[in-house]
Amino acid sequence: MNPFLRNMGILALVALVIVVLNAETALATASILLRVAFFIVIAVVLYLFWRDVARHEIATWGTRKERVFYAAVALLIVDAGWWIVRSPQGRNALISIVVAAICAYVGVTTWREQRRYS
């Protein structure tokens, strides 16, 4: 049997079981929990990277540059959390993307400036 058809059949069977058992609420709950868990996993990985590698380098920067960098990272984390929890659409999604882009620009620019003078 063609693998594509087999996989579509499995997907159809799972969808049928969800509809027959009226498990849409449980599926929505599981989806929300997976979103939150994914956000937590990404945050833990970034924290471990920061703890092992970046913290020592950032500590050598000037106070103002360090605060700007950490503020950009904190705002980016809040923005990502808002995106995961609220799932913005339309104008709110555009604002969220613009804020994330500005945070990334400020963080990368600050990091590159400090790397250039080291």
Image (tube, grey):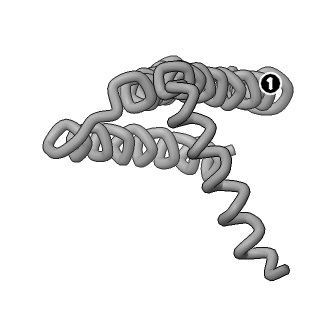
Point out residue 48 in the picture as x, y percentages from the top left corner: 80, 24
Residue 38's place in the image compared with 78, above or below, is below
Of the residues shown, which amino acid type is indicated by label 1? Leu
Determine the image quadrant of residue 99: top left
Point out residue 107 in the picture as x, y percentages from the top left corner: 49, 39
Farthest residue in the bottom direction? 2
Q: Is residue 31 left or right of residue 8?
A: left
> Can residue 16 be seen in the rendering of this structure?
yes
Q: Nearer the viewer, residue 87 or 62?
A: 87
| Image quarter of the N terminus | bottom right
- Residue at figure coordinates x 17%, y 45% from the top left: 90
Point out residue 45 in the picture as x, y percentages from the top left corner: 76, 29
Q: Nearer the viewer, residue 8 or 92?
A: 8
Residue topped by disc 1: 48
Mark 1 nearby-residue class (10 Å; few <14, some 14–19, many ≥20): few
- Residue at figure coordinates x 39%, y 38% from the top left: 103
Q: Is residue 96 left or right of residue 51?
A: left
- Residue at figure coordinates x 59%, y 20% from the top left: 33
| Image quarter of the C terminus | top right
Farthest residue in the front direction? 20
Q: Is residue 118 left or right of residue 100?
A: right
Q: Secondary structure at mark 1?
A: helix
> Can residue 68 be seen in the rendering of this structure?
no
Point out residue 92 in the picture as x, y percentages from the top left corner: 19, 37
Determine the image quadrant of residue 36: top right
